[in-house]
Image (cartoon, rainbow, N blue to C red):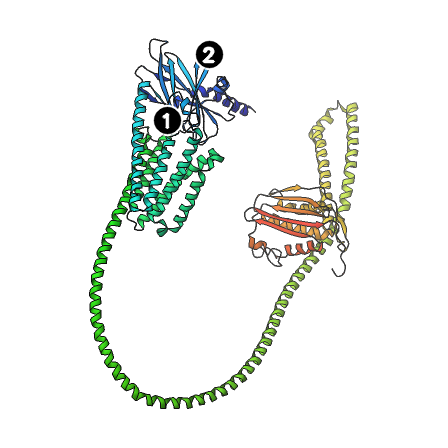
Amino acid sequence: MKFFRLILCSYLLSVALTPVLRAQQTVKLSPEFTSKHLKKAEIFFLRDTTHQLTIQDLQQPKQQRKFRMVERDNPNFGFSLETIWLKIVLKNTTLPAQTSARYMLEVDHAILDTIALFYQEGIQWKQMQAGDGFPFSNRAVKYRNPTFPLTIVSQQPHTFYLRVRSEASMVTPLTLYSPDAFGMHQARQEIFYGAFFGILLIMALYNLLLYFSIKDVNYLLYFLFIFFALLFYTSLYGHSLYLWGDQVAWVNYNLFLCFGFSLAFGLLFSMYFLQIKKYQKALYYLMIVAIGLNVSFTFLPVINYHIASQLLTLSGILSPLLMLIGGFWAWFRGNIYARFFSVAWLGFLTGGIMFGAMILGFLPVTFFTLHSIQLGAVLEVALLSFALGDRIKLYRKEKEEAQKLALETSLKNEQLVKEQNEKLEQKVKERTEEILVKNTILQQNEEEIRSKAEQIAEQRDKAEKANQELKIMNEDILVKNTILEQNEEEIRTKAETIESQRDNLAKTLEELKATQSQLVQAEKMASLGQLTAGIAHEINNPINFVSANVEALRANLNDILSVVSAYEKKQLENDDAIQRLKKEVQYKEAIDEIDVLLIGIKEGSQRTTEIVKGLRLFSRLDEDFLKEIDIQENIDATLMLLNSQYQNRITIEKNYAKLPKINGYPGKLNQVFMNLLTNAIQAIEGQGTINITTSQPDPTQVQISITDSGRGMPPEAQQHIFDPFFTTKDVGEGTGLGLAIALGIVEKHQGCIEVESQEGVGTTFRLKLPIALKKRTKND
């Protein structure tokens, strides 16, 4: 109890000291201050899962203790639907006191839904709002990112709270600027993004013009890819507000629409440009599925904005990976203009990885890491344009080579036709002369052919006569074959009959062996029952005598001791000789020892009585008569006889239900319990547990389950454990008849036995016996 109190006190102390150990750092602003990216020690946060907390609630000490330091310099709360409260403390160190200075606080993530800044004027709290879910015209600062003007009185710490809610990714990097520094920062950013969007727009229009000139669908697909990517980047970095103004719903939906179509057209461009179907059909169909998913994801924001943002973010990672894999695959398979394509997507993914590493705090915030996605996109667009240019160059070269080859082929064909005509004229002349000679020879051979034709006609008549004779002989052979097939069928039938009789004889022999073994076992059990019944009868009488006389002996001894005690009190208290004798014989200890001996005699006689009762239950010889049986009493009697085999080694767990007595043959059921419990004990090596559970699953039957924690059996052994002479024990350790006999006894009781076993876990035998067993007839 003291230990738990100590733990509780330590926990409460740690909770109390947590604010001290992680005190929030105050951002000090000197007169020379220009800009500062707030670090994690200067930003604390609180999660509001109820969305009910107000700025007044946060002033409570209980809520203040819940604020914790963010995990990284660029706070990232993932795709969270919670309300996040951020807390920063600023102090203007300018002298003299009570002078004020203005600063600008920028949240560098344009797609946050709503973000509210709470600041204190006097005793009142006021707020300013921004975010892509807030009309652009109502913002305090007309800038692409949520930005708030701050007025801070010198020499006083000021606490500001930011309440952030968003269904998209919740990233909240905070940067503080002086007004002049913010103006310079804003100008640099707009110049950079102007150049970025200008490059994308020029490349898009350039490829559109190439499409109208060359009519190659690759240029149209590439134009659509860049066009939707351009619109997506304007939404992602907050510039779509300059295009769509206060159309808040369209601004939010436009982000997903352009992103989904940009990925879809990028995949289409990759498929056609790289000829993916030619090199890898599986990747081709996978890209088709990805295109369908990207297009379908564009409609999800109407149903669930939060899920849509997660799915499209995941697709934005996987789709470029598919394109990169397709590029390398085509490159390695010999597509030479795939090299620019692969390097382009590799550069874009590298930029994305660098930006993610910066957000997670693994890379510092620099110009290159902050704009790595934009730089990667420019590199990607440029290299893909080079890839298309390389494709045009390759097509032009192939066209020139094809034209040159066609000209050479035409000249060769013309020369070949001329030579062939000359050869053909010579061959025609030669063939004409040969035909004239052959015609003369044919005329001479015509008479010979006519003579041979007459000879052939005579031979044909002889052949027809011979065929007729062969036909008659074939009919005789067919008749004989039919007779042989009938005889063969009869022989096959007799062979199958003999084989069946042999199998029946083998099966009958096995059954005779099993029956003989069961008869021997039954004879042994009957002899053992007679012997056990005789021993129990012989032991029972003297044990009853001992049990009956122990109490009488104790009563008589107590009477004698009371008389001796009274005698001592009256006459022998002052007799020193008697006292010495009592010490010598240890009179008091002897009396105490007599009590112990009497208790031992009583317990021993009771234990012997229980054993005799168990022997009498186990050795019932009235096998031909149905008896009412207490199942649980018979199980206990069997356990008593097996006590020496499991005591001090195996724990017996009994879960007995209240069961009615059943009709049955007690001696036979005891034999079943003996076999199952003996197998369970022998299956456990060392320490273990045997669980015996009884239940009544329905009004007509009872169920007994015996579960051991032994070695278990493999599935192939479970299929044969009830077969006669099958055993899982070592050679010489079992006859293989125990479970076969047990199954026969259970079936004789119109019940069933089931087994479940798992190697290394244990085995369960489950017996189901009817409560009202019908008496067997002579034919049973």
Residue under label 1: 144
In this orientation, which residue lies closer to the viewer: 729 or 257? 257
In x, y percent, where is residue 652?
63, 42
Using the rendered image of the protein, determine whether residue 728 is visible from the camera's viewpoint.
Answer: no
Q: Quadrant of residue 160?
A: top left
Residue 293, quarter of the rendered image: top left
Mark 1 surroundings: few (<14), some (14-19) or many (≥20) residues within 10 A: many
The residue under label 2 is 123
Q: Position of residue 723 (x, y in %)?
A: 62, 58
> In whole angstroms, how far apart are the C-alphas of marks 2 and 1?
32 Å
SS for tag 2?
loop
Q: Relative to the observer, which residue lies in front, 475 or 399?
A: 399
Using the image, determine if residue 505 lies above or below residue 280. below
- On the picture, is 532 further left or further right than 254? right
- The spot of residue 497 in percent (x, y) is 62, 71
Q: Residues within 10 Å of mark 2 (few under 14, many from 20)?
A: few
Residue drawn 36% across the image and 32% down it: 234
Is 146 above or below relative to 405?
above
Residue 749 falls left or right of residue 379: right
- The reply to whether residue 100 is visible in this rendering is yes
Element at badge 1? loop
What residue is drawn where x is 21% and y is 66%? 416
Residue placed at 69% from the left, 60% from the top? 519
The amino acid at mark 1 is Arg
